[in-house]
Image (cartoon, rainbow, N blue to C red):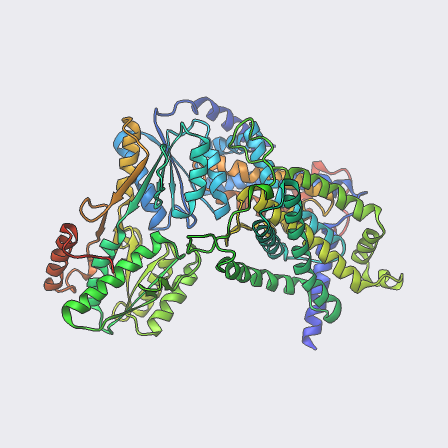
Amino acid sequence: MTSTIAKRELDDAGRKLLVRATQGRENFEDLVIVPIFAVVAALVLGALIMLATGVDIATIGKSFVALAVGSFGSLNAVSETLTAAIPLVLAGLGLGLGFRAGLFNIGAEGQLLMGGMAAAIFSFSFPGLPFPVLMLLSLTAGAVIGALYASIAGILKATTGAHEVISTIMLNLTSFQILVYLLRQPYIQKEGRSDPISKSVPDAGRLPQLLDWIDPNMRLHAGLFLMLIAVAFVWWLLFRSKIGFAFRASGANPDAARYAGMKSGLIVVAAMATAGALAGLAGAAQVQGVLGRASPGFSAGIGFDAIALALLGRSHPVGILFAGILFGGLEAGGRQMQVDAGVSIDLIAIIQALIIVFIAAPLLVRAIFPWGFTRATKGGK
Amino acid sequence: MTFLSKIGLAAAMVAGSVTAASAFTACQVTDTGGIDDAGFNQTAWKGVEDTMAAHGIDGRFLESQAESDYEANLNSLLGGACDVIITVGFLMGDATAASAAANPDQKFSIVDFAYDPTIPNVLGQVYATDQAAFLAGYVAAGMSETGVLGTFGGINIPPVTVFMDGFVAGANYYNEQKGTEVTVLGWNLESKEGLFTGNFESLDDGRAFAQNLYDEGADIVMPVAGPVGLGSAALADELGTDALKIIGVDADQALTDSEKAHVYLTSVLKRMDSTVQQVIEAAMDDTFEGGLIVGDLANDGVSLAPFHSFEDAVPAELKAELDAIKAGIIDGSISVGM
C-alpha cells in the first residue's frame, strides 16, 4: 500500500518537473529568456565560487577569456566544441523526446554504452565491408541495440508499471558491468592487452574527419551531419507526425490520451525505443567518430549531461541543439581554462550544475533579473 | 550587470599581461584520479614543479576526467604553446602516439609507456618498479604478524602489475631465505590474475578491497591504484596499525598523505618527478631525443621510502638484509623476476 502511494508521489513529482521541461512554444520568456539568464547567473556564481576558493580577480578574468577562446575563439576551438556537442545533442534529443512523452528517462548513459559497444563489435566483425556501408551499418547497429536496451524499461513500465526512473537507473548500472565483461572476452578484447579495451574500429567503419585537411588535430567528424539530421527528424517526429502527437498527448495528459483511444503501453515502449535509438547513435558516433574503440570509461557521463541538456533546451529539438553547442563549448573551453589560467576543470561541472538549478527554478531567475521579464510572474510556473 | 562589467574589466587587464610569459613551457596531461592524488599524478606533476623552481620555466597541466578526454586534452595543448608535452599514464599510449605522428615537430614524453619501435619525437619513461616492490615485499613479509599480505591494483595493465610482481617475488624470496610461509593475497605471479578495482578514483573501493583482504587475514596491504589507496589508509587508521598497515606507492605517501602518515609502513617510490625533470631539462638544452628512460634502483629511479613512524619497529637486522638485497639486485646477483 505504501509503495503505491510512494509511486504516485514519484509520478506526480516527475510530472511536475516534466511540465516545466516541456513548455509550449507560446511561452517565449520561459523558453528563451530563462535559459539565457540561467547561463549568465551560473557564470557569475562560478566566478564568485572561484573568488571564494582564493582565485584572484585577474585569474578569474583570464579564465573567462580562456573559456571564450577555447570554445569559439578559433577554428580548432569550434571543431572541439562541435565534436563534444555531437553525442550530447544526439542523446539529449532522445531524452527530450521521452520528456515530451511523459517519461523521465535517466538511462541514456547505459543506452549510449550499449549502442557504442554494439557499433564497435559490428564494425570489427565485418572488416571486409566497404566504406560507407560498414560505417552506416555500424551506426545502425548502435541505434538498434540502444533501442532494444531502452525498450526493456519501456516494456517493464507498460506491462508492470515499473517506474522508468528506477528501471533506467538500474539498467545503467547493469550496462557498466556488461560492458566490462564484454571488453574482457577474447573475441572483443584488443590483442596483446590485459586491460578491458576493445579492438579498433576499421577505417571503413569510421565517421570521416571533416577538417583534417586543414589540421590533422581537428577532430570534427561526419557525426555533425548525423546530429543535424537527427534534430530535423525529431522535430518532424514530434510536431508533424501522428506518433509524435500521441507522444505529446500522453505526456501532456496521459488520462486524456487514453480516453482518446491512444494505446498508452505501445506509446511508452515506442517513445523509450526512439530515445534509446538516439542515445545508441550517440554512443556509436562517439566510438566511430572520436575514440575508435570502446573502453570502460568511454561514455564519460555524456548520458547524464544530456539530461541537463534536454532540460536546458526545454525538450525542443532546436533548443537541445543550442544547449548542446553551449555544453560542448563549456567542455572545450573548460580545458583551455585549465591550461591558460590553471583553474580546475571541475569548475565547469559546477557551472553546468548551476545552470540546471536555475532552469529548474525559474522563479529564482525572475527574482534575480526582474527587468528581463515584461509579464508578471505567473503563479506556480 | 555590474558583475559582468567587472569581469570584462578583469579580462581586459589580463589580456594585456598574458603575453609576458617565460621562454620555456612544459605541459602535462594527467591521468584520471586528479593531480592531487597524493601519488601517481602528483609525483609526475612534482617533476614539472621542481623544474619550474630550478629553471624558472612555465608549467601547465590539464587533468583527464575520463579516458575519452586524453585526445581532447592533448589537442588543447598543441598549437605551439608547449615546448614539451608530457602525458602521464600507460592508458594514454595510443593517444600520445597518434598525436606525435600528427605533430612531428612537437616534443612529447610519456610516463609508463615504451614504444616499440620508438617514435622519434616521443621519449618514454618507464620504471623497474618491481625492484623496489621486491624490497617492500621482503620487509612486509618480515613485519607481518599473521603471515598473510595483501595487494590489489587499479586496472590489469603492466605499470600496475609490475608493483604486484615485485611485491610477491619479494615475499617469496623472504620465504626462501627464512623457511617461512608468508602468503600474498590479491596477485598470482603465474596466471597474472588478481584483485583489481577497475578504476583509479574510488576511495570507497580502496576501503572495501582492503577490508576484504584484512578479513582474509592480511595485516599489511599494498594498494596499487592511485588515490584508491587513500581509502585503504583510512581503514587502517580506524582499525589501528597493529591490525593493518599500508604500503604506499609512487610517492612517499607518509609525506603526501600526512594526516594518515602513521599507517604507512613504507612506500614503493617511483621517481617520476626525477625522470620528468630530466626530460624537461633535455628539451631545454636541445639534447632531447626519442627513445626510453628507465628508472631503476641503481639510478634511484625507483627506491624504498623511509619507514618514518615504523623506524624503530623495523628490526635493525631486517634493515641490514634490505641493504644487502638492494646491492644484490643492483649487481644482478638477485633476480626480482620469477
The image quadrant of residue B243 is bottom left
- Quadrant location, the N terminus of chain B: top right
Side of A40 relative to A103 (left or right)? left
Choose between A364 and A343: the one closer to the eye.
A343
Specify the farthest residue to the front: A128
Side of A311 relative to B124 (left or right)? right
> In the image, is residue A173 above or below residue B20?
below
> In the image, is residue B297 above or below residue B60?
below
Specify the farthest residue to the bottom: A1
> In the image, is residue B29 above or below residue A121?
above
Q: Does residue B264 appear anywhere in the picture?
A: no
- Where residue A164 appears, as percent x and y from the top left, is 68, 63
Q: Does residue B299 appear anywhere in the picture?
A: yes
- Where residue A172 appears, as percent x and y from the top left, is 59, 60
Question: How many numbered tags mark residues here?
Answer: 0
> In the image, is residue B43 above or below residue A101?
above
Q: Which residue is at a point 31% across and 63% down the rendered structure image?
A: B189
Choose between A86 and B295: the one closer to the eye.
B295
Q: Which residue is at a point 45% across and 45% down the rendered structure image?
A: B64
The image quadrant of residue A12 is bottom right
- Quadrant location, the C terminus of chain B: bottom left
- Where residue B115 appears, as percent x and y from the top left, is 36, 42
Side of B110 relative to A196 (left or right)? left
Choose between A87 and B291: the one closer to the eye.
B291
- Where residue B173 appears, as percent x and y from the top left, is 19, 64
The image quadrant of residue B141 is bottom left
Q: Which residue is at a point 30% across and 74% down the rendered structure image?
A: B217
